[in-house]
Structures are given as C-alpha cells and as structure tokens.
Image (cartoon, coloured by chain):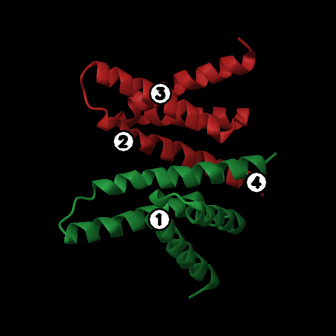
Chain colours: A red, B green
Amino acid sequence: MSLEQNLFEQLKLDYRQIIINYFVNNEASRERIDKFINKVFDYNLPIPKIIEIHMDLIDELSKQLKVEGRSDDILLDYRLTLIDILAHLCEMYRCSHR
Amino acid sequence: MSLEQNLFEQLKLDYRQIIINYFVNNEASRERIDKFINKVFDYNLPIPKIIEIHMDLIDELSKQLKVEGRSDDILLDYRLTLIDILAHLCEMYRCSHR
C-alpha cells in the first residue's frame, strides 16, 4: 500500500469515528472533527474524495442496518456531519486564500 | 440599504430559486448553481453566511408547509443542495489556494 493509500485509509477510519460519535456532541467529538479537517487541509485532499469517504461509509452502514432488518432513515441525519465538515473546511480554505 | 446588504439579499433570492428547482436537475438548474457559486466566491462571502441563507429559507418554507397542514420532511432533502454547493465552492477555494 502506498503512503497516499495509507493516509486515505486512515482518513476513512477517522471519518467512521466522527460519524459514529457525531450526535454525542461532546468535546472529544468536536476535537476529532477539528483534527480531521486539519488533516484533510494539510494533505490538500480533493473535496470529491471526502464525498467518496462519506458515501462509502453510508452505503456500508445502510447494508448493515438492512441485514439487521432496521430502517436506514437515521443515516440521513449524517448529512449534517458532512455539511459541518465541508463548511469548516471551506472557511479554512477561504481564509487562507487571499 | 447598503451595497453589501443588497448583494446579500440578491444571494438569498438566487438561493431560493436554486432550492425550488433543485430536483428538476436540468441544465438551467445546474447553471443557476454554478452562477451562485461563482458569485459567492467573487464576493468572498464567509461560509457561515451561506449556512444562514440556507437555514433562513428552510425555516420559512417549513412554516409555510405547516400553515398548509403539510409535513416538512421533504425539506431534509435540500441538505443535498447545500452539500452540493459547499463541495463545489470548497473545491474552488482549494484549487485557487496553492
């Protein structure tokens, strides 16, 4: 596995932790998000890659819920996580831009 | 009304048109979004302002639906519009950044 692939796999694991703990909404949860945003910014990761990480994880969780015979409606709420991350990351790029 | 307020009011009107036509998903709809993103980028509008435009519009539409005795569940789908816009805008700032 290349260094780049390694980093991407690590980001996927980080994002999974963020999603799973998102609605706990404590300090650790906020720190985890800030760390992820800083990492993505430092790596200059293309935004479509973040969308890919999100979609892949949601697909996986959806399949898991269906296997358990549960509705996957709850997963829609995680769009808020993605909005949260994109908004902060976008503001970071904006402020460093001019 | 100051020039800045004027621009902000115009952006609110633009965003309303985007939301209302988002799931039509034709060429005009895509062009409207691209134009909005370019405008926001040119004005260097802080990202929290975009979130504010979105939230205010969703609140307003929600009240309207309630008055009509209809569910506002459908409004959750418009989070996709916000994700779409933030992702494209963020990529634009990212690419112009280094």
Q: Are marks 4 and 1 on the same chain?
A: no
For badge 2, the amino acid type reads Asp
Chain that bears disc 3: A
Mark 3 in CB contact with mark 4 (< 8 angstroms): no
Q: Which numbered disc flags the more N-terminal residue, 2 or 3?
A: 3
Name the image quarter holding the N terminus of chain B. bottom right
Which of the chains bears the disc numbered 2? A
Q: CA distance from mark 3 to mark 1?
A: 29 Å
Could you say which disc has been placed on residue B21 in the image? 1
Whole-percent x, y for residue B34 in the image:
64, 61
What's the CA distance linking mark 2 and mark 4?
31 Å
The alpha-carbon separation of the residues under discs 3 and 4 comes to 31 Å
Q: CA distance from mark 2 to mark 3?
A: 13 Å
| Mark 3 Cα-neighbour bin, 10 Å: few <14, some 14–19, many ≥20 | some
Residue B92, placed above or below residue B28: above
Left or right: A25 as drawn, with respect to B31: left
Asked if A21 appears above or below A41 in the picture, the reply is above
Could you tell me how far apart the alpha carbons at marks 4 and 1 are, in whole angstroms? 31 Å
Q: Residue at x 36, y 52 (%)?
A: B76
Relative placement, left or right, of A70 versus B1 is: left
| Residue extending furthest toward the top | A1
Q: Residue B46's x, y, as percent?
A: 61, 61
Q: Which mark is residue A80?
A: none
Residue designated by label 3? A57
Mark 2 or mark 4, which has the lower sequence index?
Answer: 2
Residue designated by label 2: A77
Single out the mark in the foreground, 2 or 4.
2
Label annotation for residue A97 = 4
Does the residue at mark 1 contact the one at mark 2 (Cβ under 8 Å)?
no
